[in-house]
Image (cartoon, helix red, strand yellow):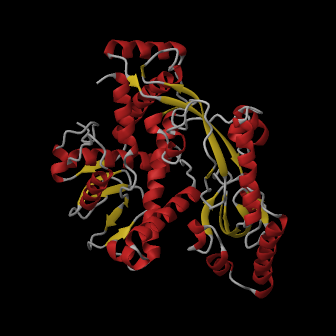
Amino acid sequence: MNCITKAFALFLLCSMWSGLTAQEIIDTDAAGDTAQNEDKPLTSGTTFKVDGVAAVVGEYVILESDIQQAIESLKQQKVEGQDLSTCSVMDKLMEDKLYAHHAVIDSVMINEEQVRSYTQQQIDYFINQLGSEEKVLKFYRKEKMSDLKKELLELNRNQELAKAMQQNIVEEIEVTPEEIRSYYKELEEDGLPQFGVELEVSKIQIIPDVPQEEKQKVIDQLNGYRTDILENGSSFATKAVLWSEDESTRGDGGLIRDVDRKSQFVKEFRDVAFSLQEGEVSKPFETEFGYHIIKVEKIRGQKIDLRHILRIPKVTAAAENAAKDEIEKIRKRIEDGEITFAEAAREFSDEKETASDGGIMINPVTQDRMFELKNLPPELYPKVQNLKEGEVSIAFNNPTRTGKTRYEIYTVSDRIEEHEADFAIDYVKIKNFALQAKRIKAIEKWKNEKIAETYIKLNGDYRTCDYSSNWIKQ
């Protein structure tokens, strides 16, 4: 297996573990009762119910059921070549817990809004697949949807902590030109890899204008809620459940906990939140998501708990038609040779990230301009797969996650056929592979050091596994 294949394999192994369970530590008193213990650090003197506990890593336990659920999850993902042995899965679960444990110790921050949003998306997906909330609850053996949501929130939060910890480990690592050349020489010795067909893709995006009367309608609605809350004592939480269009927080009455000034909310949201006193309700304000009002529930040092209500102004059919007409006219001008695609993108596109560069899209995985055809994002592949170089696609509606209309046209501005890795042509990809290999070494070094200083206990047959890391500390 050459260096580039190893890097791919390790990257794939690190990315396939979404959806696995994460169980908080359970402490057992002398009488044998169990209770959740989130604050008390685990020490070698802590006692456990041995039955069902496979391992302990820091303040986390791994149960027998966690291992079986992880195996089932990996089976569903059907990743080619994955090792589904109990020992292999146990190895990776302990690694995840090690990251999460030290993320908490190091006060690593995660985006709580994203965690909540993703959790709501999961629940919506479950309901869509099974047909109703009742069937979802029956399938997951829960009495209330709030219980399932709470459990999923904790699982997703721990996964984000693990990812954030890994990012912290490698965020300052860079590779020099000499390291990149050395890495390429290693590839030459092992056999240079083949790269498939690659495309440079450009796009132009037109977003329908929201009429001012629609914006004012939403502002008036939010002002009405605010007046009813302040003057009549109405519940902010109830208003959020009834009227908020933020699906990720609506079920909890708009509640968002542990917001600080580093939280990854948009700037306008943070600025308003931290300008309020405890119990104060903001006036309506605008972000890229729509219009909000916020109530600060509690201030706890540098963090606040708040509730918010989001209302999204509706785009009229006339505005959508006008946007569609505009992008069709732009497309025709490009095809008639009146203007180039790059010139049109700079002048007309509403997507700021690509407009200044003539509409050229950046591959989010490699940070390169080129996309390998077979690895194009699913939403992009059918739009450009059959385009010849310089050809312009038909206009597509690519709605935002909140359902807002966005009209887009695409072109393939460059195409490279299948070829053997070349230092000049593929420099950015080779640089990324070299960087990935260096990061993997740094993570391995960090992991070995933290295993040595972290409380770890394995029970029963799990002590006999041949692990990739020294979990037994022998």
Q: How many marks?
A: 0
Above or below residue 362? Residue 424 is above
* Image-based side of 420 in relation to 382, left or right: left
The residue at the point 37 percent across, 49 percent down is 17
In the figure, residue 148 lies in which quadrant?
Answer: bottom left
In the figure, residue 289 lies in which quadrant?
Answer: bottom right
The residue at the point 69 percent across, 78 percent down is 236
* Image-based side of 322 in relation to 120, left or right: right
Where in the figure is residue 428, as x and y percent of width and height?
53, 23
Where in the figure is residue 73, as x and y percent of width and height?
31, 55
The reply to whether residue 401 is in sight is: yes
In the figure, residue 391 lies in which quadrant?
Answer: top right
Q: Residue furthest front?
A: 336
- Which residue is more in the foreground, 180 or 398? 398
Image quadrant containing the C terminus: top left
The residue at the point 43 percent across, 49 percent down is 100
Where in the figure is residue 59, as x and y percent of width and height?
38, 55
Image quadrant containing the N terminus: top left
The reply to whether residue 450 is in sight is: no
The residue at the point 54 percent across, 40 percent down is 384
Where in the figure is residue 112, as x and y percent of width and height?
57, 57
